[in-house]
Image: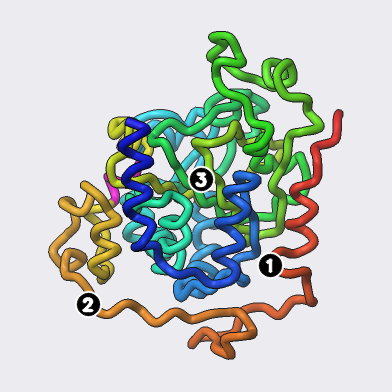
Amino acid sequence: MQVRYRASQVRHLRRRPPLSSIGRHIVAELRREGVAAVPLEELPFASNRALLDAMPRARQHLDRLDARASRTLEYGEGFEHCVPINPSTIATQLPEFFMWGLDESLLDIVERCIGLDVAYHGVCIRKELVDGKAVGTRLWHRDAEDLDVIRVLVYLNDVVDDESGPFEYVPRHSSPSYRDFHGVERIDDEQMRRVVPEWRWRRAKGPTGTVVFGAVAKLFHRGKIPLSARKLASFCYTSRHPTDERLCRSYSFEPGIPFVDEPLTDRQRACLWKYQELLPTTASRSVQRRPEMVSARPESQRVFARMPLPVRAPRSPMVTAAVQASFAPSELT
């Protein structure tokens, strides 16, 4: 299977989409480190403004949820460590999140990372339960939906310290294989320390709006156990021939697809993989023209139509100091 997969990636090389400078930086970081984090306003995505406008509504919705909401989940399994917003609710009340995951410029970056045409499995908006339990994705793991899985996290609140429960990972160059754990299925911190010293672990921290890209099938990672209710949106992508379709569907946005009522380009519909069969008639009509990219980068001299993004102090190329600091080695506690 891997031989056929790699051969398909080679054939796809001549069809690779062009990238902006920040897009090239993200792809390079994922190949080197396995993770890249950037502020949302540095990404030249046309749908950024809509996402920013929707963030307060998402936080308010999450604040109203409690652990009892898990009894009415539309997802197939999991989520013992958090409370998510159901896909049908996102599609009808927070469609900006779902559509941000289909932004053409974001799809370009993900396609370059995977090296094949992309399947978009949707978005999960959730808040962590503050219960101190090492369960679910708080345990160390590598995603298994496909040989290449890209997850994009958007922090909906500040995640600037360990208590906030940042995304934690072992960089690609240091990440072990499951064989190194000799059959241990539950990989907690103690098990990981026996294989990889803690000083090699990394934590992706940043303020509200930080976007974390992760090549999560290539490295061990987890959500650090939080002491406060971390809120985030998680977007998932694979190739269109994933190795485990059942796993893809278990955590996917599939229950929300029938409620999507947004115009889609041909490419966006194709990225919905097998889920596109569930689209309502209005969303099934393809938009022939690719939306014009609106960039927040100074070099473009273009701004969002509704209002400009916040102006921040000058930062180092591509990443802020806060994001740079997030990749410092973890401190032993």
277 or 202: nearer the viewer: 202
* Numbered badge on residue 126: 3
Q: Are marks 3 and 2 in contact (CB under 8 Å)?
A: no
Q: Give, as a single range, the part of the protein colored magenta.
A: 252-256
Read off the residue under disc 1.
Answer: 318
Helix, strand or loop at disc 2? loop
Amino acid type shown at disc 1? Met
Give whichever of discs 1 and 2 has the lower sequence position. Answer: 2
Kindly identify the residue that appears in the image at 58 percent across and 34 percent down.
219
Read off the residue under disc 2.
Answer: 288
Circle 2 crowding by C-alpha within 10 Å: few under 14, some 14–19, many from 20: few
3D distance between C-alphas at marks 3 and 1 = 28 Å
3D distance between C-alphas at marks 1 and 2 = 32 Å
Q: Position of residue 171 (x, y in %)?
A: 66, 38
Is residue 186 found left or right of 288 in the rendered image? right
- Residue 94 visible at all: no
